[in-house]
Image (spheres, rainbow, N blue to C red):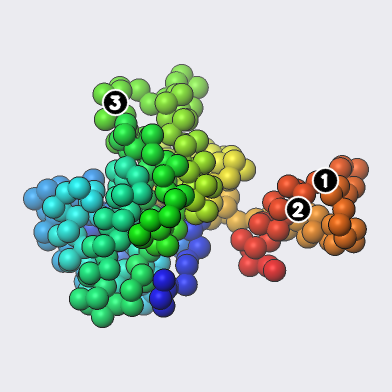
Amino acid sequence: MADTFASPRMRSWLFAPGDSEKKMGKAIASHADIALIDLEDSVSPENKSAARLMVCEQISAAANRGRLWVRINPVSTADCIADLAAIMPSRPGGVLLPKAEGASDITRLHHYLTALEAANGIPPGRTAVAALVTETAAAMFRTGDYAGTYPGRERLVAMSWGAEDLSAALGAREQRGPDGEYSHTYEMARSLCLLGAAAAGVAAIETVQPEFRDLDALAARAQRVRAQGFAGMLAIHPAQVDPINAAFTPSAEELAHARAVVQAFADHPGAGVVALDGAMLDRPHLALAQRLLAEAGEK
């Protein structure tokens, strides 16, 4: 992949509707790692044409386009082509593909992007891709497909999941139980996304929390899914960004422990197991510590 953007951090992805200059401006000015301009669900069919022009103007005027991404319409629709043709001259950092149903959708999007990059003087492969991989029933069976070798594979940097579109596809009137937690089908969608992303070697991104005023619940959920292996979370309101960033940023204590784990193994070359603070640690603990330090920018 030639001349790629430096990959931005992916802790927080803040949605903003592409037909609102005010909301787009707030998202771009926010502390979100990625400002995610939406041309799909939050824009009505009659407003999509005008929204495409507004999105292109907003991105073109921005200083750091690498963190400005666009959620386009599904690759199976004519709106997808219209979205890409309108926004690619502005050189967004990436696109989020909704309702992805496997590697073939990534390949199809890759071919569109390759043609439009050439037409707009953009180095080939420079536009990254993230995919929403559980929004249809068929998509649920294909979350492992993204790990294979196929055209466009090198563009894929993240996978996320969604409950709203999936519930609509299922005709389900309920997503959560009396305790407020997702029911089995949606927990399975979350797990399949996490496993698929791990298999593909890309970031797993947690879905939105619609209750945007309950920041304590948001912080608790973000911390919980980070502990499970997610690298970031989607947001629908600027107030959600700081709690998400905090939850997905390693603490000083975590980093100190990770350094101690790495040092303990360095002090015992060739050891499969070492003792640290009264606990026995094996090689998977070392791998986790090294990964945490790498994510924090430490060697």
User: Residue at position x 31%, y 56% from top?
Assistant: 107
Q: Is residue 93 visible?
A: yes
User: Residue tagged by mark 2?
Assistant: 286
Question: Is label 2 in contact with label 1 (beta carbons under 8 Å)?
Answer: yes
**Amino acid at circle 2:** Leu
Q: Residue furthest front?
A: 149
What secondary structure is marked by label 1? strand
Quadrant for residue 279, please give it: top right
Q: Position of residue 238 (x, y in %)?
A: 40, 54
Nearest to N terminus: mark 2 or mark 3:
3
Question: Is label 2 in contact with label 3 (beta carbons under 8 Å)?
Answer: no
User: Residue tagged by mark 3?
Assistant: 170
Residue 199 lies, with reference to residue 37, above or below; the image says: above
What secondary structure is marked by label 2? helix
Q: Position of residue 178 (x, y in %)?
A: 46, 19
What secondary structure is marked by label 3? helix
- Of residue 185 and residue 221, the one placed in the foreground of this image is 185
Q: Residue 281, which numbered label? A: 1
Q: Residues within 10 Å of mark 3 (few under 14, many from 20)?
A: few
Compute the Cα span from label 1 to label 3: 44 Å
**Amino acid at circle 1:** Leu
